[in-house]
Amino acid sequence: MLAVEERVRQYMKKLEPEFIRHLRWLHQHPELSFQEYETTSYIKEKLVSWGISLEESPVETGVIALLKGREEGPCIALRADIDGLPVREESTNAFPSLQEGNMHACGHDTHTASLLGAAQILAALREEIRGSVKFIFQPAEEVSLGAKKLMEFDCLENPKVDAIFGLHNSPEIPIGTVAVKKGPLMASSDRIVFTVKGQGGHGGIPQRNADPIVAAAAIIQAVQTVVSRNVSPLDSAVISICNVKAGEGTVNNVTPHQVVMYGTVRAYKPEIQKLVEARLKSLTENICAAYGCQGSLDYIYELGVVDNALSLYQAAYEAVVATGAQPVDPDPSTGGEDFSEFLKGAPGFFYWLGVRNEENDCVYSWHSPHFKADERCVAIGAGTYAMSVFTGIETLCKKSL
């Protein structure tokens, strides 16, 4: 009998036209977060047709399913996100969105199609699986709530997941490659809200006021010193204030009573997150006091670091090689991903799937109305998911000996 990796490659080639049909249907029917009803029905229909059991889900959209192998053993979870974005498509895709104003501008259709492909392959090879596979088609990644909602209801239990794998397309790396990274791949993503309260009044009589705009401007300048003077040069962090609310309309001669600023913090280590939070709070309170104002900071931990388990690196690397794709070592991204929520319940590994192809106009970044992925990525994604089950189970079994 052929080795399992050869059989996976055969299915990748044989079923690729079907994988691409999944991709095209999904791309034409994008749905927003927690509204993925058609997508959910499509996924369920395909899984049931392949003899995969549907599990109860705590939310109306998304799918959790289970495939049992020939014998008891480790449980590997495979996760894909399924939601689109409120973006009007302007790409050169031959099968553009049919939903006016909505688009798979982040390529979640490639992830969903890849996991459907893996499910079909694994269903055909279930007698080769020494354990079980849990498929998680997750809603609402774009609003950073889908994974949290599933984890609230113990989606990695019954059976307990021993390892989880996921992937995201990348227009930065070429088709035929898959990024396999040791350690942190994507940064934490935290929300920061500054509130500066002063004493408003006439802009032409500033001595009677406690101007919160001046204090807010000082905060904007000072927070960058946290990165340059408090975070070690051997580590990294990003602090960006992206939204400032002060005053009403176009009024030009009234000092407001309050300024509210919104921003984001990105880092690769929990201890850096804590450091940034403490320094920002101290700077805010003390700068505002110096300007006769009151200042406060709400630091909201939204998403953790996507930190690939070192214990799964070899399994991930071998899975990619087995598909015939080329593993590459990428620079980490300061983008956030709620796959990090699943890492609170099980060790995991996250890939980037190369979709870039200059000749086919597949060069645009995530969330661009021109975003387009090379369709050949889906077979590679399906093979990578499927082989991760076999290499992952093998790794876990060796570890338990």
Image: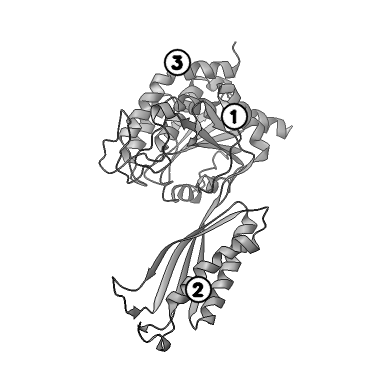
> Callout 3, which amino acid?
Lys
In front of the other: label 3 or label 1? Answer: 1
For the point 47% across and 72% down, the residue is 216
* Nearest to N terminus: mark 2 or mark 3: 3
The answer to whether the residues at label 2 and label 3 have Cβ atoms under 8 Å apart is no
- Corner quadrant of residue 348: top right
* Image disc number at residue 4: none
What is the spatial separation of the Cα atoms under label 3 and label 1, in whole angstroms?
23 Å
> Callout 2, which amino acid?
Ser
* Nearest to N terminus: mark 3 or mark 1: 3
Q: Is residue 101 visible?
A: yes
For the point 54% across and 40% down, the residue is 158
The answer to whether the residues at label 3 and label 1 have Cβ atoms under 8 Å apart is no
Pick the residue in front: 277 or 119. 277
Residue 198: image location, x then y, percent: 43, 81
Residue holding disc 2 = 296
Residue 77: image location, x then y, percent: 54, 36
For the point 59% across and 65% down, the residue is 225
SS assignment at label 2: strand
> Callout 1, which amino acid?
Pro
Q: Residue furthest bottom?
A: 208
What is the spatial separation of the Cα atoms under label 2 and label 1, in whole angstroms?
46 Å
For the point 34% across and 28% down, the residue is 24
The answer to whether the residues at label 2 and label 1 have Cβ atoms under 8 Å apart is no
Residue 139: image location, x then y, percent: 41, 43
What is the spatial separation of the Cα atoms under label 2 and label 3, in whole angstroms?
60 Å
- Corner quadrant of residue 43: top left
